[in-house]
Image: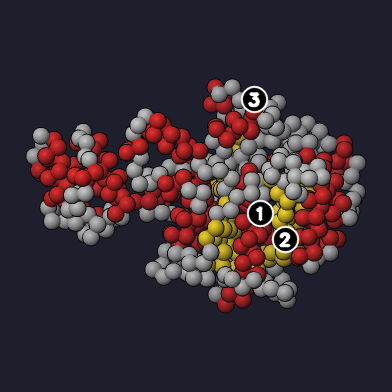
Amino acid sequence: MDRAAILDELKKVLDPYTENKDMLKRIDDTTDLVKDLKINSANLVDIIIDAEAKYNVEIDFDLAEKMITVGSCIDVIAEKMK
Amino acid sequence: MGRRVVITGLGVVSPNGVGVPAFLDAIRSGVSGIRWMPSYQELNFNCQVAGMPHFEWDQLKNYVSEVTFHGLKGTAIGYGIRAGLDAWTDAGNSLGGDQTLWDTGCVFGSSVADVEVVKRVIGRVDAREAKKLGSRVVEQLMNSSITAYISGRLGFGNRIIANSAACATGTQAILMGYEYIQQGLAKQMLVGSSEHVDPYIFGAFDSMRILSRKFNHYPEKASRPMSATAGGFVPGSGAGALILEDLDFALKRNARIYAEILGGANNSGGQRNGGSMTAPGATGVIRCITDAVTNADISPGSIDLISGHLTATAADIMEIQNWGLALGRNGRNFPAINSLKSMIGHCLSAAGSIEAVGVVLQILHHFVHPNVNLEDPNPEILKMIGMDCMPTALVEKEINTVAKANFGFGDVNTCLIFSKYKSNG
C-alpha cells in the first residue's frame, strides 16, 4: 500500500471522530488531528485502535505518541506495514 | 415558604410509547407495552415477558453529535439522553448554545450502570485485550454517565447529580430538583431517571421468584396490579424526564406551565418494624406520605388521585392499607388510584419518572388513566376501598391534586404532591 492508498483509508478511519468534514476531504501531510480536524485528544486512542484493525498492524504506545499529523500517521503505518 | 416550583417540560421513553404524544395516547387508551421475549425462553427464565420501548437507536443522531453517537453503546444512556433532551426542548429551551447555564442543573438517576457495557469490558479484559477498549468505555460505565452526556450537550453549570435509590430513584430525582429550586439554589433543573433491564438484571430478579410467570402466552395480561391474580411484577425499561423551574423564572420567559410540585418527602424505614432489604415497612411508608402532605401544606382530603407504586405483588394490599392510614381515607372516600405498571410493567429506577410524566399529563388533560387487567380486583383490597376508586376504563375529570409514591429495595420511600398550576397559588 503506497502513501496515497494509506491516506485514502486513513480518511475513513478519521471520519467518525471529526465534525469537520470539509477539512477531512482536503487533509494532507501537514494536517494536525487535534488542531485542524478538532478531534478530541481522548479519541486519538480510538483512532489508533481502528487503524490497527484497518491496516492489520500493531502500534505501540511510543509510536502512537508520534501520530500527531496526518503525515506522521502515514509514516508510522507505512513503517509498520513493511 | 420557599420558591414555587413548576413543571414546564416533559420527555418520555416508555414501553407503550416513545415521545409524549404517543405516550399520552397510550395511557388514555390503556395500551400495553408488555411483549413476549423469545430470548427469555431460551434463557430458561420463569418470566418471559417484559416492557420494552420501541426505540429507534439511530434517531439519537438527532440528539447528540455524530462523534458522540459513534461508540455510544449503553441502552439506558440512549433512553436517558432522548427523554432528557425531549423535555428540554418541550420546555421551549434551545439546544446547545456556547454559554454555560450556571442556574440550570440536572439530577438524573439509574439503579445500575449499564450491564451490557460492563459485559463488553469483561470480555475484552479477560481476553487480555484491554488495550482495545478505547476511550469511550469509562464514560459509559460511570453511574453519572447520563448526567454527563445531558449536561455536556446543554451546557448546564449548576449541580449535576446522578442519584440512585432503587425503585424510588425517579421520584427521588424529582424531589431533589424540586428542593434545590425551592431553596433558591437553581432556576431550572432537568430531572428524571432511566433503566434498561437487560437479561442479566432480569435474570437476577427472576431468580427471586417475584416476577409474573403465569401469563407468558398473554403478555398484555401479565402485569396485574391490585388484582386477585397478581402474581409478580413484569420488568420494564425506559426513561422519563421533567423540566422543573422556578415559577418567576418560568413566567419571565413566558414558559408554558404544565403543573406545579407542592412538596414531597423522602425517607427510609431503616429496615426496622417490618421493613427489610426487599420490603417497605408500613411505618416508614405512612410517615413518608404524611410528611409529603404536610410539606405540601395540603389537606389529605384534597387529593383527587393517587399514582401508586403498585407493582402487582402481594405488597399491593399493604400499600393500599398504608395510603388509607396515612390519608385517613377509606371505602368510597378513598381517592381514585391507578398503576401505570398495569400497562408498562415496573421500570425500576425509571418507574418514578415515567409515572410522574403520566401524572402531569393526567392533570393537564383532565383524566384518570385506566387500570388495565383489573377484571378481578383483590378481595382484600375491596374490603378497604370501593371498586369505583380503581377505574378500569378512562375517566375524564378535573384533577387538581395528585400524590405519587415509589418504594425501593433498601426500605427507601419517596412521595411527591403534584397540583394543577393556579396563578394565585
- Circles 2 and 3: CB atoms closer than 8 Å: no
In the image, is residue B237 above or below residue B162?
above
Q: Are marks 1 and 2 in contact (CB under 8 Å)?
A: yes
Distance from the alpha carbon under mark 1 to that under mark 2: 9 Å
Residue type (three-letter) at the residue carrying disc 2: Gly
Secondary structure state at the residue bearing disc 1: helix
Expressed as whole percent of the image width and height from the top left, the position of residue A66 reads 18, 49
Residue bearing mark 3:
B46
Task: Give residue B264's mark.
Answer: 2
**Mark 2 — on which chain does it sit?**
B
Q: Quadrant of residue B187?
A: bottom right
State the SS at label 2.
strand
The front one of B321 and B97 is: B321
Query: Dot 3 falls on which chain?
Result: B
Residue at 31% across, 50% down? A43
Residue B41 pos. (x, y %): 58, 23
